[in-house]
Image (cartoon, rainbow, N blue to C red):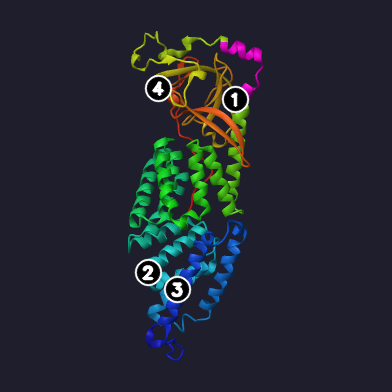
Amino acid sequence: MSSDTEDKVELLENASEIMEDLADKLKKLYKYRDLFFENHPVELALQKHACVDVKKEALVKKFESYDVDVQIPFPLRAQFLYMKGRCYNISNKYDARAMQCLSKAVKLNPHLVDAWNELGECYLKNMNMKEAKASFEGALKHERNRLSLRCLAIILRQECGDLKQSEISSAMTKSVELAKEAVAQDIKDGISWSVLGNTYLCQYFLIAQDPATLKLCMSAYKQAWSDPVAKGQPDLHFNKGVALKYSECYGEALQMFDQSCRLDPGWQPPADERAELVRYLTEATKLVHTRGKLKAKRISNMVQTIDKKMLGDYATDSDGARKDVLLELVDIDKLQEGSNEGKVILGRVVGSIHNKNSVPFTFAIIDKSLKCVCVSVYNWANGRGVIIGDVVAVPEPLLSSHAMDSRLAKYEFQSIRVNNPLVLLVNGKRVNRNQYASTRVTSTYEVN
């Protein structure tokens, strides 16, 4: 409808003032939601969505009190519909009314970047990735902006689930580039930092379980933490917990999962991760302290038959060509906390732990000192590993102690982290290259 055919009697003469007032109320509504835990105790987490919905519906009534096709001047209609759609879209669930308003807004004004982005968010809530991607790309045609960039980074990560392994690397590289560009748009935006951290976390699982990638991930989360909006999101705590878990900072990981549960009691993934990690840590403690529940006589026979010949390439009397990696054989109880350069240990497997997603593959070894420790191996292809009785040589072991006694968990054990299974010798033989592979985790750690 053109301005010439509008009913001049019905047009709001103070439409601009009304729009400004609605925009201010909408801004306050989003601030109320985003900073809820800055102004309310976490004990009100269960009521958060209901509280937001009450305020949302009050503002919806104000928007709905105006007939956009009659009362709002034509030049302002796209903006009005965008704001109305954004009001509907504040809920965490899909609202068809938001889709209707936002679709009209972008038709009326294809250059309205905010409307394209909000429409993309709406499609995401409705799990329509194809249309969401088209919406964010439509926004970028008019302006490079952080919301479009970071949402496209998320969509690219999710698309990796349908790609071949050979195609994933380039997709993840593109996702990282988009997330970095989003951060560069506003380095104080914690949500963009959080998305970048999640991108690195996905890269860790989909490309290679490299500790350096986890460090980049944790660095991004640290930046996100300084933004109260991002810090109040349960998904930031959850994803940071995942990163801490695979950094083997178990106590901090449990605290992150627990806080995520408190911030959103109805969200199941953090509760599942917390329970799974507690189970893993309990099993690790039990495995080490009971030495796999093997009888003393069997353990005695196992350790007495450990042969130095099983050191293979790492043996001091090796005639092989790898003289550059000669290491000193030491007992497990002589290891120091942290790195043990120039050392190698040789022990027999007494048991293993079933771990969700098989990351890491964890087993326990014991040697003649009768000291038992867990060994967590990353990048070991699913279905591979060792069995009870195998002799395993671990060069330059990285030893860590883990202990906690609180309402969240009770555990105490030591473990050795191995990032590359190819450095291990199993029964005197080096692990085959076909046993090296990043394990693709099926559960999702995505956030908006």
Please provide the residue range marked out in magenta: 289-303
Which of the two labelled residues, at mark 2 and mark 1, occupies the earlier sequence position? 2
The residue tagged 4 is 341
Residue 383 visible: no
Task: Using the image, tell me which numbered label, if any, was put on residue 288.
Answer: 1
Question: Quick one: SS at disc 3?
Answer: helix
**Residue at 49% in and 58% down:** 124
Task: Using the image, tell me which numbered label, if any, was put on residue 24.
Answer: 3
x%, y% of residue 318? 39, 9
The residue tagged 2 is 112
Task: Say what amino acid the circle numbered 1 marks.
Answer: Val
Task: Say what amino acid the circle numbered 4 marks.
Answer: Glu
Q: Main secondary structure of the magenta part?
A: helix
Which of the two labelled residues, at mark 4 and mark 2, occupies the earlier sequence position? 2
Q: Residues within 10 Å of mark 4 (few under 14, many from 20)?
A: few
Which of the two labelled residues, at mark 4 and mark 3, occupies the earlier sequence position? 3
The reply to whether the magenta stretch includes residue 302 is yes
